Amino acid sequence: MSATVVAKAKKDRRSAINPDGSRKTIHPADVKGRFLRRRRTLYAVLIAIYIALPFVRINGKPAVFLDIANRNFYLFGQTFNAQDFWLVVFLLTTLGFSLLFFTAWLGRVWCGWACPQTVFLEGVYRRVERLFEGPRNQRLKLDDSPWTREKILRRGGKLFVFLLISLVLSHVFLSYFVSLPSLVQMIQDGPAAHPTAFAWMAAVTGLLMFDFAWFREQLCVVICPYGRLQSAMHDDHSLVIGYDAARGEPRGKLRRAERIALPQVDGAAVAEKRGDCIDCERCVMVCPTGIDIRDGLQMECIGCAQCIDACDEVMDKIGKPRGLIRYDSLAGLAGKPRRMARPRLFAYGALLCVAIGGLTISLINRTPFEANVLRVRGVPYVLEGDSIRNQYELHLINKNPHPTRLRVEVDSPVDAEFTLPTETITLESLQSYRLPVFVRVRKEDFQGPFELRFHVHDESTSRTKVTTGTFLGPNSNHARNAS
Ligand code: SF4
Ligand code: SF4
């Protein structure tokens, strides 16, 4: 068999696909090391944040509560309603440019360190699996073994715990949308009383089970578009996890690693030092997507750094310096200096700064209340003796996270009489109110349509908003059109 065929067969054996095209279940081997410790710490922090957010209360509301049913949104002490939806454009733009900037700078750091798929798979489900089914070799044997009592107990126990975890996670997920007290009430009332919420919970639990018990790395490899886009965002100076081929090649098993006999020259064997890679395949065995990083940067690499830890461990054992697989840039791995200052990073950084600036300005300028003047339906004006009456509704919404008192004043360029049921009104957070306003102007003072200015002052934030309404009378075009 030729060397090419052997290499291809070896590569195929490693991939996540069987020769017949079916999927090969990947069982990454256990690994120890500095990156694993750091990742596990970060995973624990991220999972704690995910679970804690609906519990933690800021200004009397959950830190994150997306009340879609009422179109009210509570985010870290701030309240938003449907009228603030335009802010989502700035938010998405900021997130999009962050992705570009951080990928160009730090590669797929998001995938390996903070993506929920990796955090929950590697930080929770895989560890439960290890508990029930043992290390990689035992798991592989269990896959191939017939359905004995032991296999049923191990698999069943694992899936049962997976289901419990998925149920907890789906309930936490639901509490982001219905609030914790409502969720507790729903659980007490039972599924029949809240069929929609129950259906959502069941669907999320099913999705989590499908993903974390079976689909796993396929989500990153087949579905997630980010892996496919990364090559467009990367350049030779982006941080990646890579194999130092110049140092590692030619690879060879440890026994023959130091010296090998090469073809004879002038009757004497020429000896040459082998590369540092001893071809132990530990880096392949620990990889959660089943790839061989020695084949170069690949779309399937999620940047989890397990292969770095695995290879460092091997290097420690054979007395070689660490870093045969390491965080570096493609330029660095090729022996060139890594450049931080480069046009792509400046361009993405500038776009990100603009997006952050836009989002910040929008948030600062966002009024803590809404005030809109609406003309009441029906005739645009009413003639009452020697005066003309217009009727409006001032639609007020308190968007503060706390109750506030709104004071209303109206001014007019012509002499007018204003009738309001009250000039101040106290509204709860996100409460709305329609305040009727009657304006009378003497016929002799009315020379044509004019603007009324409604000043609404928020006493808790000392912010004032001015909104206008047009006063109409018998000789206004609008009135003629209407009549
Ligand atoms: S773990 Fe290191 S030494 Fe072992 S095969 Fe991978 S790169 Fe080579
Ligand atoms: S190649 Fe290394 S960094 Fe990439 S997914 Fe596999 S183990 Fe993780």
Image (cartoon, rainbow, N blue to C red):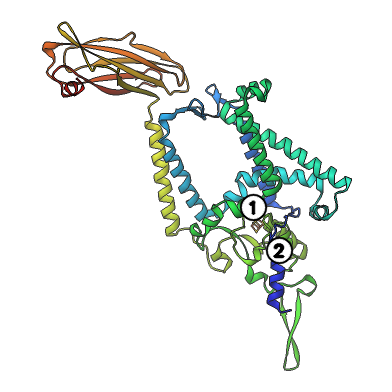
Mark 1 — residue? 218
* Image quadrant occupied by the C terminus: top left
Residue 453: name its quadrant.
Answer: top left
**Residue contact at pointers 1 and 2, CB within 8 angstroms:** no
Type of the residue with mark 1: Gln
Q: Is residue 100 left or right of residue 11?
A: left
Mark 1 or mark 2: which comes first in sequence? 2
Seen at 59% across and 63% down, the residue is 297
Between marks 1 and 2 in the image, the one whose residue lies nearer the viewer: 2
Q: Position of residue 163 (x, y in %)?
A: 73, 37
Seen at 40% across and 50% down, the residue is 350
Q: Residues within 10 Å of mark 1 (few under 14, many from 20)?
A: some
Q: Position of residue 122 (x, y in %)?
A: 69, 47
Q: Is residue 161 left or right of residue 416?
A: right
Depth check: 90 or 262 in front? 90
Q: Position of residue 328 (x, y in %)?
A: 58, 60
Seen at 80% across and 55% down, the residue is 140
Type of the residue with mark 2: Asp
Q: Check the image and report above or below for 2 versus 323.
A: below
Depth check: 475 or 227 in front? 475
Residue 47: name its quadrant.
Answer: top right
Q: Position of residue 119 (x, y in %)?
A: 65, 44
The label shown at residue 20 is 2
